[in-house]
Amino acid sequence: MPINAEYRGPGELPEIIPVFPLPGALLLPRGQMPLNVFEPRYLAMVDDALRDGHRLIGMIQPDSNHTKDEAKPALFRVGCVGRITQLAESGDGRYILELTGVARFKVIEELTALTAYRQFKVDFFPYADDFVARKGEDAVDRTALLDVLTDFLEANNLKVDWEGIESAPNEALVNALAMMSPYGPAEKQAMLEAPDLKTRAEILIAVTEMDLAKKRTTGDTGLQ
């Protein structure tokens, strides 16, 4: 994992973080998420994250079912904070960056901030296990996961680097597949909030099986 900082527990992260609301975006601990940042408020957020030294940005999904003001959407109560581990300037005003997931958080409250981007007080302690790499991965049904992945690839005429997949540890495999999966905000949020890696894998398998069943009965690929 390409990260210079070592976070050994919730107490090593700040209580207040900037957040980047993005529907369908799933960041998980030790996962890598590319971002193309172009809105002025989020460009400022990146600048501030670099300036304060933490280099941390919270990724969280808007909650459309509870949004009354589209300019300031309601958010789900759980997100994941990531550290900026790569940054490039595009030459046309954008930042191309990569976040490496550190730990999930629960939202406590939104702060009244002078910044154009939103800031929240958050709690990392409910997810203390996120700081332990590969925790619980022996409980993952790897065979079932690879079987459903094979079916999904065949149904959608896709190919992957099987050598890379077969050599990946269970945590990296489950989290990468969850992050890359083409499902909607509700499914992504369920995978984010899964209490352990085994449950996350089971949710991913179940959602994929439902997607495949839908395609078999309707001809819909499920990929939107």
Image (spheres, rainbow, N blue to C red):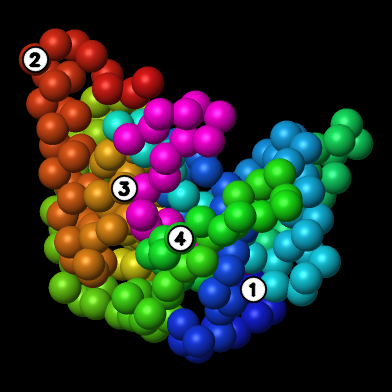
- The residue type indicated by label 4 comes to Glu
Q: Is residue 178 visible?
A: no
Between the residue at mark 4 and the residue at mark 1, the CA separation in whole angstroms equals 28 Å
Q: Which residue is mark 1?
A: 3
Q: Secondary structure at mark 1?
A: loop
Q: First in sequence: mark 4 or mark 2?
A: 4
170 sits left or right of 91 in the view: left
Residue 109 - label:
4
Above or below 71: residue 101:
below
Q: Which residue is mark 2?
A: 217
Q: Mark 3 and mark 4 in contact (Cβ < 8 Å)?
A: no
Q: Secondary structure at mark 2?
A: helix
Q: Residue at x 78, y 64 (%)?
A: 50
Q: Nearer the viewer, mark 2 or mark 1?
A: 1
- The residue type indicated by label 3 comes to Gln
Residue 21: % across, % down: 52, 43
Q: Quadrant of residue 131?
A: bottom left
- The residue type indicated by label 1 comes to Ile
Residue 4: % across, % down: 68, 78
Between the residue at mark 4 and the residue at mark 2, the CA separation in whole angstroms equals 44 Å
Stretch in magenta: 66-83
Q: Is residue 13 visible?
A: yes
67 sits left or right of 102 in the view: left
SS majority, magenta: loop
Q: First in sequence: mark 2 or mark 1?
A: 1
Q: First in sequence: mark 1 or mark 3?
A: 1
Between the residue at mark 2 and the residue at mark 3, the CA separation in whole angstroms equals 26 Å
Crowd class of label 4 (few under 14; some 14 to 19; many from 20; radius 10 Å)? few
Q: Nearer the viewer, residue 146 or 222?
A: 222
Residue 72: % across, % down: 53, 36
Q: Nearer the viewer, mark 1 or mark 3?
A: 3
